[in-house]
Image (cartoon, grey):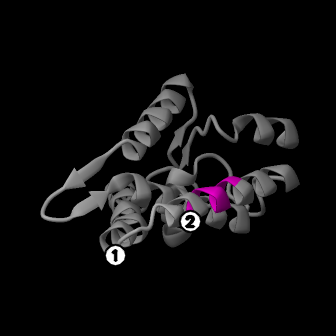
Amino acid sequence: MPKRQTGRQIGRWGTAARILVGSGFLAAAVVMRPTLADALLGFVVMPGLVVGILAMRGKKAPPLCLDGPFAHVANIAIAIGLLGVRIQVGFVLDVRTAALLFYGASMLLAAWKGMGACELFAISNALRQRDDQLGCPLFLPIDSIEIS
């Protein structure tokens, strides 16, 4: 099994930034009045999809390290896509609210565990004890300054 990086990958300011933004995302989701379906999508389905997709690489695969310009653009596109969708199928499933719940919880987990890079993989990394990375343009400037 690939080794997981031990110790904190982020410093004091990176931790504070993730707590601040993650709390803000969760507060915004609460203001949007999430339904049970939104909460299930944000806390179960979205993390489950990420875990499942990354697990398809296999237990012995080397840690994924997507931190180039294309990965940063892809990350932004995923976030914009998730934060802009509202679906009506007999009931309203607000993907925006679910995405805020997912990203907010992931950011708080990353802050608590000291995980760097993108919060999109934080829950998967914690559950699978991995160190898969996806570039995060939101926290890259803070992490770069602190870690260098």
Quick one: label 2 or label 1, which is nearer the N terminus?
1
Say if 62 sits above or below 142 in the image: below
Q: Which residue is mark 1?
A: 36
Q: Say if the magenta span includes residue 22.
A: yes
On the image, the x and y values in percent for residue 69 come to 55, 23
The residue shown at (85%, 50%) is 13
Report the side of 41 relative to 120 (left or right). Answer: left
Q: Amino acid at mark 2?
A: Ala
The residue shown at (35%, 66%) is 38
Q: Nearer the viewer, residue 85 or 131?
A: 85
Quadrant containing the C terminus is top right
On the image, the x and y values in percent for residue 133 come to 56, 46
Q: Which residue is mark 2?
A: 105
- Image quadrant assignment for residue 49: bottom left
Q: Which residues are magenta?
A: 21-26
Q: What SS does tag 2 mark?
A: helix
On the image, the x and y values in percent for residue 3 come to 60, 60
